[in-house]
């Protein structure tokens, strides 16, 4: 009987020691007063300290642990804070970051892992790789490399794991990538659509909801409030994403906002602003979903060509612009890219989005087509209309011309061996057929090619005598 009683006592003690300590409500988030719609500095005096750079706090789903980063690349460390013995510990370096730069840590939706990038972890390529650690007792394991195809000879950063273990992350060029987790392995990465990978983005720091219903990232695209701003996109029923919306000038400022994450209870967003960590109520996620979506260019308009004296007509494809509120809300206007109206011969019919007319001379027109929705938001697509002469088989004989110097270090002069006072249009194309320079001249012209890569280019001359071709070499 005594042995049984003693066994029960030992079992009770064991259970008390091994069951995770629950956090009283007044100790959650360090007992801070939760923010509303106005951002507040997160944990001032604990995590956010004056004169120090903090980055990317992530809070464990149980609320009993937090990780964040300190320092400046390439020496950045992940710090960890735990709720133990009825109080929060002081920040300490996470075990996986003691001897290496490791940051942008984020807990998996179940909290059983923490994912991050580590600089020079155990891997065959060196550099920065995506890694994870698992809980070992009260600590985290050393980095476990996620391997190929996620990690490459490039650097990979900023992982975000969703509920099905698929992963969103960045590569070393700053582009946001996605890799599906399927049958126990990651599939090859794919680049996210251009609406996320805008050329002016500069490191998107993706955060995707566990159920992938929305996507928050930062971008320095035009129309923001300065630096990098935070944007949100929502997943549509067909699996595509809506045009991102700026989170507004209460959250976004003239400085950089980045590194966002939504807490596991879905009540708050943490993010970085002006080298400090902030938090704010997450009500904007639902409210922004029902505001107007600005249209955007989904498919660029290719260059169009016409012939002097022949009727020209071009109808812009319906798939050029996308409006998540419905393309039937769009109205269209057209002008030259310099703001001048279209030339007299070229008409634009808004109802069919058609350009038409009969050109009378050689010319290249730079067109801007603008689509505007009922809320006044707009997007513009630019394209060229190049007008040349009709060319028959008999007219393709080369006219005499000279290109000097050729090869060139960056500038060439084209001289015609003809005294006719008629215009000639030139095009210089790369080997993929893309026109990189175009213009019109009469007897000679100098062309600056210093902004072109080394290699061979195709020169085409259009005149009343036909088409002449040649090659230009840049060395």
Image (tube, rainbow, N blue to C red):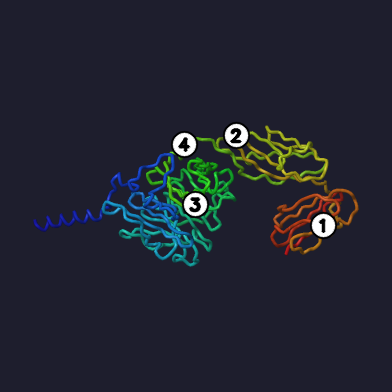
Q: State the SS at label 2.
A: loop
Distance between the alpha carbons at the discs numbered 1 and 2:
47 Å
Q: Which residue is mark 4?
A: 287
The residue lying at 8 percent from left, 56 percent from top is 1
Q: Along the polypeptide, which appears first: circle 4 or circle 3?
A: 3
* Left or right: 462 as drawn, with respect to 129: right
Of residue 345 and residue 190, the one placed in the foreground of this image is 345
Of residue 178 and residue 247, the one placed in the foreground of this image is 247
Q: Along the polypeptide, which appears first: circle 1 or circle 4?
A: 4
Residue 210 appears in the figure: no
Q: Which residue is mark 2?
A: 376
Q: Which residue is mark 1?
A: 414
Residue 205 is tagged as 3
CA neighbours of label 4 inside 10 A, class few (<14), some (14 to 19), many (20+)? few
**Picture quadrant where residue 324 is located:** top right
CA neighbours of label 2 inside 10 A, class few (<14), some (14 to 19), many (20+)? few
Residue 303 appears in the figure: yes
Q: Are marks 1 and 4 in contact (CB under 8 Å)?
A: no
Distance between the alpha carbons at the discs numbered 3 and 1:
48 Å
Distance between the alpha carbons at the discs numbered 4 and 3:
22 Å
CA neighbours of label 3 inside 10 A, class few (<14), some (14 to 19), many (20+)? many
């Amino acid at each position: 009987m005594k042995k049984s009683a003693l066994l029960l006592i030992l079992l009770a003690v064991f259970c008390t020691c091994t069951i995770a300590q629950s956090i009283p409500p007044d100790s959650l988030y360090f007992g801070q007063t939760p923010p509303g719609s106005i951002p507040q500095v997160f944990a001032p005096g604990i995590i956010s300290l004056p004169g120090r750079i903090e980055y990317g706090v992530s809070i464990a789903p149980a609320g009993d642990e937090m990780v964040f980063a300190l320092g400046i690349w390439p020496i950045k460390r992940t710090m960890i804070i735990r709720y133990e013995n009825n109080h929060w510990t002081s920040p300490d370096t996470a075990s996986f970051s003691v001897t290496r730069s490791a940051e942008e840590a984020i807990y998996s939706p179940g909290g059983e892992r923490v994912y991050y990038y580590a600089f020079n972890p155990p891997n065959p390529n060196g550099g920065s790789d995506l890694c994870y650690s698992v809980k070992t007792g009260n600590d985290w394991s050393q980095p476990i490399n996620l391997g190929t195809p996620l990690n490459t000879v490039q650097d990979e950063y900023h992982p975000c794991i969703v509920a099905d273990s698929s992963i969103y992350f960045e590569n070393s060029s700053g582009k946001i990538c996605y890799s599906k987790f399927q049958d126990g392995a990651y599939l090859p990465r794919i680049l996210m659509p251009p609406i996320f990978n805008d050329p002016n983005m500069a490191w998107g720091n993706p955060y995707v909801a566990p159920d992938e219903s929305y996507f928050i990232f930062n971008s320095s695209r035009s129309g923001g409030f300065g630096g990098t701003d935070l944007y949100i996109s929502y997943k549509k029923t067909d699996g595509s994403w809506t045009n991102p919306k700026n989170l507004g000038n209460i959250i976004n400022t003239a400085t950089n906002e980045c590194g966002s994450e939504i807490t596991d209870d879905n009540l708050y967003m943490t993010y970085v602003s002006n080298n400090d960590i902030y938090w704010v109520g997450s009500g904007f996620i639902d409210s922004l979903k029902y505001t107007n979506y600005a249209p955007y260019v989904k498919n660029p308009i290719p260059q169009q060509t016409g012939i002097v004296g022949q009727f020209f007509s071009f109808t812009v494809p319906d798939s050029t612009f996308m409006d998540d509120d419905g393309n039937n809300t769009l109205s269209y206007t057209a002008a030259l890219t310099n703001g001048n109206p279209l030339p007299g011969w070229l008409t634009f019919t808004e109802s069919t989005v058609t350009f038409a007319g009969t050109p009378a001379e050689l010319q290249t027109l730079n067109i801007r087509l603008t689509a505007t929705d009922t809320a006044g938001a707009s997007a513009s697509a630019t394209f060229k209309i190049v007008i040349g002469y009709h060319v028959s088989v008999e007219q393709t004989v080369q006219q005499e011309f000279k290109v000097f110097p050729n090869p060139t270090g960056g500038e060439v002069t084209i001289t015609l061996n003809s005294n006719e006072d008629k215009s000639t249009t030139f095009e210089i194309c790369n080997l993929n057929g893309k026109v990189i320079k175009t213009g019109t001249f009469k007897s000679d012209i100098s062309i600056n090619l210093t902004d072109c890569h080394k290699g061979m280019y195709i020169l085409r001359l259009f005149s009343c005598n036909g088409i002449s071709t040649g090659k230009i070499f840049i060395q």
